[in-house]
Image (cartoon, grey):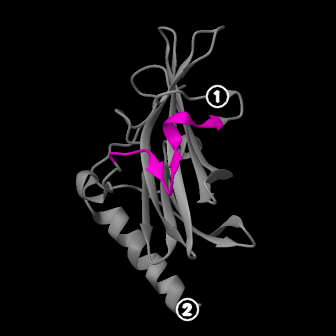
Amino acid sequence: MRLAAACFYAFAALLTFSSVRAAAPPQSASHIVNGVDFDELTFGSIHLHKGTYTADDPANTTTIDSFYHGQVAGKTVAVAVLRGELPATGYNASAEAFEVSGGKANHLSDLGDFSYFSEGDGPYPDNWIYVSFTDNKLYADVWNHDHRCDKRHDWVVSTYTMKNNRLVRINTLRHHRKGIPVECRAT
């Protein structure tokens, strides 16, 4: 357990002190994992077809903004960052984790969400979350709107593993990502 904690803090220190571009993991060019095509995903009221879904009222268009996959405790896990463009006002985004097995994607958890409506609403463009898979764990570093004015704790990195077919958070660390300005404007 101490080794895992030491590894977590070493990884968190790398996130804290590395540059923004170097810390961002590469995205998968394909949205297909183990035969599951996330461009055809049905999730809640969203039914993506060719990677896009447009609701009727209001005309909110949802797409996969970013996509990552890897191994967590021996299970294949995919993270889809879904972006909902709102008519002429901005966008909402959420990072959703899925276990992929047996040709199906089973929703595990929401890793974070973000809303952008005007300059000053947070990290822009599109760098409110950083996802990586290392040592059979999932790491999600998410900008925290509620702590946006805290110059040392405006981000939260969480470490996840799988237990009993559930995604379980095993550690969190609040920090500030070097190279990203603090967004402290009134909302």
Dot 2 falls on a residue whose secondary structure is: helix
Categorize mark 1 by other alpha carbons within 10 Å: few (<14), some (14-19), many (20+). Answer: some
Residue picked out by circle 1: 46
Q: Nearer the viewer, residue 37 or 13?
A: 37
Residue type of the residue flagged with mark 1: Ile
Dot 1 falls on a residue whose secondary structure is: strand
Mark closer to the chain start, 1 or 2: 2
Magenta region includes residue 36: yes
Residue found at x 24% / y 57%: 19
> Is residue 65 shown above or below 61?
below
Residue picked out by circle 2: 2
Residue type of the residue flagged with mark 2: Arg
The answer for how far apart the CA atoms under marks 1 and 2 are is: 42 Å
Residue lying farthest right? 164
Residue found at x 35% / y 50%: 28
The mark closer to the camera, 1 or 2, is 1
In terms of image quadrants, where is residue 23? bottom left
The span shown in magenta is 29-42
Residue found at x 58% / y 10%: 59
Residue found at x 43% / y 53%: 68
